Amino acid sequence: MPIPERLNPSFASALPPAPVQFDPMEEARQRLIVALDVPSAAAAIDLVNELEPSCHWFKVGLELFVAAGPAVLEPLVERGHSIFLDLKFHDIPNTVAGAVRSAAGLGVRMINVHASGGPAMLAAAKTALEGVPDPPQLLAVTVLTSMDQAQVNAAGVDRTPGEQVELLARMCLEAGIRGFVCSPQEVARLRAITGPEGVLVIPGIRPAGGDIGDQRRIATPAEALRQGASYLVVGRPITQAADPQAAAERILEEMAAALTD
Ligand code: C5P
Protein backbone atom coordinates (compact mmCIF):
# COMPACT_ATOMS: atom_id res chain seq x y z
CA MET A 1 0.00 0.00 0.00
CA PRO A 2 1.65 3.36 -1.01
CA ILE A 3 2.09 6.01 1.68
CA PRO A 4 -0.57 8.71 0.84
CA GLU A 5 1.95 11.59 1.01
CA ARG A 6 3.98 9.93 -1.71
CA LEU A 7 1.03 10.32 -4.05
CA ASN A 8 1.05 14.10 -3.60
CA PRO A 9 3.88 15.56 -5.74
CA SER A 10 4.21 18.66 -3.51
CA PHE A 11 5.41 16.42 -0.65
CA ALA A 12 7.68 14.29 -2.82
CA SER A 13 10.88 16.38 -2.65
CA ALA A 14 10.65 16.76 1.16
CA LEU A 15 10.43 13.02 1.76
CA PRO A 16 13.33 10.59 1.90
CA PRO A 17 13.38 8.27 -1.12
CA ALA A 18 11.08 5.26 -0.80
CA PRO A 19 13.04 2.23 0.40
CA VAL A 20 14.04 0.03 -2.54
CA GLN A 21 12.83 -3.50 -1.95
CA PHE A 22 15.42 -6.18 -2.82
CA ASP A 23 13.81 -8.34 -5.48
CA PRO A 24 15.95 -11.47 -5.95
CA MET A 25 14.33 -12.46 -9.27
CA GLU A 26 14.87 -8.98 -10.71
CA GLU A 27 18.46 -9.00 -9.43
CA ALA A 28 18.95 -12.40 -11.11
CA ARG A 29 17.50 -11.02 -14.38
CA GLN A 30 20.00 -8.15 -14.31
CA ARG A 31 22.85 -10.67 -13.97
CA LEU A 32 21.95 -13.34 -16.55
CA ILE A 33 23.32 -12.90 -20.09
CA VAL A 34 21.91 -15.30 -22.69
CA ALA A 35 24.36 -16.20 -25.48
CA LEU A 36 22.54 -15.97 -28.84
CA ASP A 37 24.83 -18.48 -30.58
CA VAL A 38 22.63 -19.02 -33.63
CA PRO A 39 23.39 -18.74 -37.37
CA SER A 40 20.94 -16.03 -38.47
CA ALA A 41 19.17 -12.84 -37.40
CA ALA A 42 15.81 -14.60 -37.78
CA ALA A 43 16.84 -17.37 -35.37
CA ALA A 44 18.14 -14.77 -32.91
CA ILE A 45 14.91 -12.76 -33.02
CA ASP A 46 12.85 -15.95 -32.52
CA LEU A 47 14.86 -16.71 -29.38
CA VAL A 48 14.61 -13.14 -28.09
CA ASN A 49 10.84 -13.13 -28.68
CA GLU A 50 10.59 -16.25 -26.57
CA LEU A 51 13.00 -15.20 -23.84
CA GLU A 52 12.33 -11.49 -23.39
CA PRO A 53 9.61 -11.88 -20.75
CA SER A 54 12.33 -13.44 -18.56
CA CYS A 55 15.67 -12.14 -19.82
CA HIS A 56 17.11 -8.67 -20.15
CA TRP A 57 20.71 -9.26 -21.34
CA PHE A 58 21.71 -10.96 -24.59
CA LYS A 59 25.17 -11.77 -25.93
CA VAL A 60 25.93 -11.50 -29.64
CA GLY A 61 29.07 -13.45 -30.48
CA LEU A 62 31.06 -14.41 -33.54
CA GLU A 63 28.61 -16.88 -35.13
CA LEU A 64 25.68 -14.45 -35.22
CA PHE A 65 27.68 -11.27 -35.86
CA VAL A 66 29.62 -12.75 -38.80
CA ALA A 67 26.38 -14.06 -40.32
CA ALA A 68 24.12 -11.07 -39.73
CA GLY A 69 26.37 -8.03 -39.19
CA PRO A 70 25.79 -5.03 -36.92
CA ALA A 71 22.17 -4.70 -38.15
CA VAL A 72 21.25 -7.62 -35.91
CA LEU A 73 21.90 -5.42 -32.87
CA GLU A 74 19.40 -2.71 -33.79
CA PRO A 75 16.11 -4.47 -32.95
CA LEU A 76 17.59 -5.74 -29.68
CA VAL A 77 18.78 -2.29 -28.62
CA GLU A 78 15.46 -0.72 -29.73
CA ARG A 79 13.54 -3.15 -27.50
CA GLY A 80 15.58 -1.90 -24.54
CA HIS A 81 17.74 -4.99 -24.06
CA SER A 82 21.34 -4.78 -22.90
CA ILE A 83 23.82 -6.30 -25.30
CA PHE A 84 27.23 -7.85 -24.71
CA LEU A 85 29.06 -7.80 -28.04
CA ASP A 86 31.45 -10.76 -27.61
CA LEU A 87 33.92 -10.40 -30.48
CA LYS A 88 37.09 -10.99 -28.40
CA PHE A 89 39.38 -8.59 -30.29
CA HIS A 90 43.00 -9.75 -30.51
CA ASP A 91 45.20 -7.82 -32.96
CA ILE A 92 47.85 -5.10 -33.03
CA PRO A 93 47.06 -2.11 -30.77
CA ASN A 94 46.06 0.26 -33.58
CA THR A 95 43.61 -2.23 -35.09
CA VAL A 96 42.08 -3.16 -31.74
CA ALA A 97 41.67 0.54 -30.84
CA GLY A 98 39.77 1.08 -34.09
CA ALA A 99 37.59 -1.99 -33.54
CA VAL A 100 36.79 -0.85 -29.98
CA ARG A 101 35.80 2.61 -31.26
CA SER A 102 33.56 1.07 -33.93
CA ALA A 103 31.96 -1.31 -31.41
CA ALA A 104 31.37 1.54 -28.96
CA GLY A 105 29.16 3.21 -31.59
CA LEU A 106 26.76 0.27 -31.81
CA GLY A 107 24.75 0.92 -28.64
CA VAL A 108 26.05 -2.17 -26.83
CA ARG A 109 26.74 -2.30 -23.05
CA MET A 110 29.77 -4.66 -22.99
CA ILE A 111 32.63 -5.38 -25.40
CA ASN A 112 35.77 -7.46 -24.99
CA VAL A 113 39.37 -8.06 -26.02
CA HIS A 114 41.74 -10.98 -25.37
CA ALA A 115 43.97 -10.20 -22.38
CA SER A 116 46.76 -12.20 -24.04
CA GLY A 117 47.07 -9.41 -26.65
CA GLY A 118 49.50 -7.82 -24.18
CA PRO A 119 49.90 -4.54 -22.28
CA ALA A 120 50.16 -2.23 -25.33
CA MET A 121 47.01 -3.67 -26.92
CA LEU A 122 45.10 -3.47 -23.63
CA ALA A 123 46.15 0.14 -23.11
CA ALA A 124 45.09 1.00 -26.68
CA ALA A 125 41.67 -0.59 -26.12
CA LYS A 126 41.19 1.34 -22.90
CA THR A 127 42.34 4.64 -24.43
CA ALA A 128 39.99 4.16 -27.39
CA LEU A 129 37.01 4.52 -25.05
CA GLU A 130 38.19 7.79 -23.49
CA GLY A 131 35.80 10.57 -24.41
CA VAL A 132 33.10 8.14 -25.61
CA PRO A 133 29.87 9.23 -23.91
CA ASP A 134 28.34 6.42 -21.80
CA PRO A 135 30.96 3.90 -22.99
CA PRO A 136 30.38 0.13 -22.91
CA GLN A 137 32.06 -1.88 -20.15
CA LEU A 138 35.40 -3.11 -21.49
CA LEU A 139 36.15 -6.72 -20.54
CA ALA A 140 39.33 -8.74 -20.97
CA VAL A 141 39.02 -12.44 -21.74
CA THR A 142 41.55 -14.31 -19.61
CA VAL A 143 41.74 -18.05 -20.38
CA LEU A 144 38.89 -19.58 -22.39
CA THR A 145 36.56 -21.73 -20.29
CA SER A 146 36.98 -24.55 -22.84
CA MET A 147 40.71 -24.88 -22.00
CA ASP A 148 41.84 -27.39 -19.38
CA GLN A 149 45.40 -27.87 -18.14
CA ALA A 150 46.42 -29.93 -21.21
CA GLN A 151 45.09 -27.31 -23.65
CA VAL A 152 46.80 -24.48 -21.76
CA ASN A 153 50.13 -26.37 -21.78
CA ALA A 154 49.75 -27.27 -25.48
CA ALA A 155 49.37 -23.55 -26.23
CA GLY A 156 52.84 -23.03 -24.74
CA VAL A 157 51.83 -21.80 -21.29
CA ASP A 158 53.69 -23.57 -18.49
CA ARG A 159 51.27 -22.62 -15.70
CA THR A 160 47.96 -23.81 -14.33
CA PRO A 161 44.87 -22.14 -15.84
CA GLY A 162 44.35 -20.36 -12.50
CA GLU A 163 47.91 -18.99 -12.43
CA GLN A 164 47.60 -17.82 -16.03
CA VAL A 165 44.25 -16.11 -15.32
CA GLU A 166 45.80 -14.27 -12.37
CA LEU A 167 48.86 -13.19 -14.37
CA LEU A 168 46.67 -11.86 -17.20
CA ALA A 169 44.30 -10.13 -14.79
CA ARG A 170 47.15 -8.30 -13.05
CA MET A 171 48.40 -7.13 -16.46
CA CYS A 172 44.91 -5.84 -17.32
CA LEU A 173 44.60 -4.00 -14.00
CA GLU A 174 47.93 -2.26 -14.76
CA ALA A 175 46.34 -1.09 -18.03
CA GLY A 176 43.30 0.20 -16.12
CA ILE A 177 40.89 -2.58 -17.19
CA ARG A 178 38.71 -3.83 -14.33
CA GLY A 179 36.29 -6.10 -16.21
CA PHE A 180 37.09 -9.76 -16.90
CA VAL A 181 35.71 -12.85 -18.55
CA CYS A 182 36.93 -15.95 -16.72
CA SER A 183 35.76 -19.43 -15.79
CA PRO A 184 33.74 -20.02 -12.61
CA GLN A 185 36.77 -21.82 -11.20
CA GLU A 186 38.81 -18.60 -11.05
CA VAL A 187 36.09 -16.21 -9.90
CA ALA A 188 37.06 -16.25 -6.23
CA ARG A 189 40.73 -15.72 -7.10
CA LEU A 190 39.89 -12.74 -9.36
CA ARG A 191 37.39 -11.27 -6.89
CA ALA A 192 40.15 -11.28 -4.26
CA ILE A 193 42.37 -9.26 -6.61
CA THR A 194 39.78 -6.81 -7.99
CA GLY A 195 37.67 -6.20 -4.88
CA PRO A 196 34.00 -5.24 -5.27
CA GLU A 197 34.74 -2.93 -8.24
CA GLY A 198 35.71 -5.78 -10.57
CA VAL A 199 33.12 -6.73 -13.16
CA LEU A 200 33.40 -10.52 -13.47
CA VAL A 201 31.48 -12.02 -16.38
CA ILE A 202 31.38 -15.80 -16.21
CA PRO A 203 30.63 -18.34 -18.99
CA GLY A 204 31.08 -22.10 -18.51
CA ILE A 205 27.83 -22.24 -16.53
CA ARG A 206 26.06 -25.59 -16.38
CA PRO A 207 23.03 -26.44 -14.21
CA ALA A 208 23.72 -29.57 -12.13
CA GLY A 209 23.66 -32.67 -14.34
CA GLY A 210 23.56 -30.64 -17.60
CA ASP A 211 25.49 -31.55 -20.77
CA ILE A 212 28.90 -29.81 -20.60
CA GLY A 213 29.60 -29.91 -24.38
CA ASP A 214 33.03 -28.39 -25.17
CA GLN A 215 33.27 -26.47 -21.88
CA ARG A 216 35.82 -27.69 -19.31
CA ARG A 217 36.18 -25.29 -16.36
CA ILE A 218 32.51 -25.15 -15.32
CA ALA A 219 30.20 -24.58 -12.33
CA THR A 220 26.50 -24.29 -11.59
CA PRO A 221 24.79 -20.86 -11.60
CA ALA A 222 24.56 -20.86 -7.78
CA GLU A 223 28.22 -21.82 -7.30
CA ALA A 224 29.44 -19.13 -9.70
CA LEU A 225 27.43 -16.43 -7.91
CA ARG A 226 28.60 -17.59 -4.48
CA GLN A 227 32.21 -17.38 -5.70
CA GLY A 228 31.69 -13.71 -6.60
CA ALA A 229 30.46 -13.57 -10.21
CA SER A 230 28.88 -10.28 -11.32
CA TYR A 231 27.17 -11.71 -14.43
CA LEU A 232 26.61 -15.25 -15.73
CA VAL A 233 26.75 -16.07 -19.46
CA VAL A 234 24.56 -19.03 -20.40
CA GLY A 235 24.13 -20.35 -23.93
CA ARG A 236 23.21 -23.93 -24.77
CA PRO A 237 21.60 -24.86 -21.43
CA ILE A 238 18.93 -22.30 -22.40
CA THR A 239 19.03 -22.02 -26.19
CA GLN A 240 19.18 -25.78 -26.90
CA ALA A 241 16.56 -26.68 -24.29
CA ALA A 242 13.23 -28.11 -25.45
CA ASP A 243 11.60 -25.12 -23.71
CA PRO A 244 14.14 -22.25 -23.58
CA GLN A 245 11.96 -19.95 -21.49
CA ALA A 246 11.34 -22.64 -18.86
CA ALA A 247 15.09 -23.40 -18.79
CA ALA A 248 15.85 -19.68 -18.31
CA GLU A 249 13.32 -19.42 -15.50
CA ARG A 250 14.85 -22.43 -13.71
CA ILE A 251 18.30 -20.82 -13.93
CA LEU A 252 16.92 -17.46 -12.74
CA GLU A 253 15.27 -19.18 -9.76
CA GLU A 254 18.54 -20.90 -8.84
CA MET A 255 20.34 -17.54 -9.16
CA ALA A 256 17.70 -15.73 -7.08
CA ALA A 257 18.00 -18.35 -4.31
CA ALA A 258 21.81 -17.99 -4.29
CA LEU A 259 21.53 -14.18 -4.19
CA THR A 260 19.16 -14.40 -1.23
CA ASP A 261 21.47 -16.68 0.86
O1 C5P B 1 26.66 -22.63 -24.73
P1 C5P B 1 27.54 -22.13 -23.63
O2 C5P B 1 26.82 -21.81 -22.34
O3 C5P B 1 28.76 -22.99 -23.41
O4 C5P B 1 28.05 -20.70 -24.19
C1 C5P B 1 29.06 -19.94 -23.57
C2 C5P B 1 29.24 -18.67 -24.35
O5 C5P B 1 30.25 -17.90 -23.70
C3 C5P B 1 29.67 -18.89 -25.78
O6 C5P B 1 28.99 -17.88 -26.54
C4 C5P B 1 31.15 -18.62 -25.77
O7 C5P B 1 31.60 -18.05 -26.98
C5 C5P B 1 31.30 -17.63 -24.64
N1 C5P B 1 32.59 -17.62 -23.96
C6 C5P B 1 33.14 -18.73 -23.35
N2 C5P B 1 34.37 -18.65 -22.74
C7 C5P B 1 35.04 -17.51 -22.72
C8 C5P B 1 34.49 -16.37 -23.32
C9 C5P B 1 33.24 -16.46 -23.94
O8 C5P B 1 32.50 -19.78 -23.32
N3 C5P B 1 36.19 -17.42 -22.10
Image (cartoon, rainbow, N blue to C red):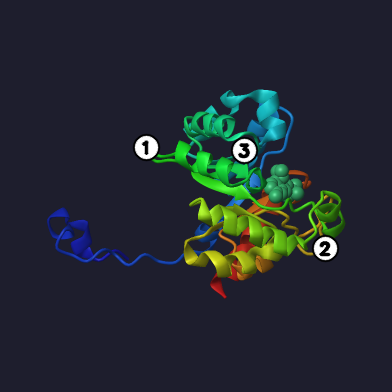
Q: Nearer the viewer, residue 148 or 152?
A: 152
Instruction: Report crowding for label 2: few under 14, some 14 to 19, many 20 or more residues within 10 A (C-alpha).
Output: few
State the SS at label 1. loop
Is label 3 or label 1 in front?
A: 1
Residue drawn at the location 52% of the way across and 55% of the way down? 174
User: What's the distance in space between the residues labelled 1 and 2, CA to CA?
Assistant: 46 Å
- Residue at numbered disc 2: 209
Residues at badges 2 and 3 in contact (C-beta under 8 Å)? Answer: no
**Amino acid at the residue labelled 1:** Gly
Image-based side of 23 in relation to 61, left or right: left
Q: Position of residue 235 (x, y in %)?
A: 71, 47
Q: Is residue 17 above or below residue 141?
A: below
Q: Nearer the viewer, residue 213 or 139?
A: 139
Residues at badges 1 and 2 in contact (C-beta under 8 Å)? Answer: no
State the SS at label 3. helix
Find residue 254 and report its image quarter: bottom right
**Residue at the left extreme?**
10
Residues at badges 3 and 1 in contact (C-beta under 8 Å)? Answer: no
Residue drawn at the location 44% of the way across and 66% of the way down? 22
Q: Position of residue 209 (x, y in %)?
A: 82, 63
User: What's the distance in space between the residues labelled 3 and 1, CA to CA?
Assistant: 32 Å
Residue drawn at the location 51% of the way across and 28% of the way down? 102
Q: Which mark is residue 131?
A: 1
**Amino acid at the residue labelled 3:** Val
Q: Nearer the viewer, residue 184 or 113?
A: 113
Q: Is residue 49 above or below residue 233?
A: above
Image-based side of 159 in relation to 255, left or right: right
Q: Position of residue 99 (x, y in %)?
A: 56, 30
- Residue at numbered disc 3: 48
Find residue 89 and report its image quarter: top right
Q: Is residue 211 visible?
A: no
Label 2 beta carbon within 8 A of ligand 1: no
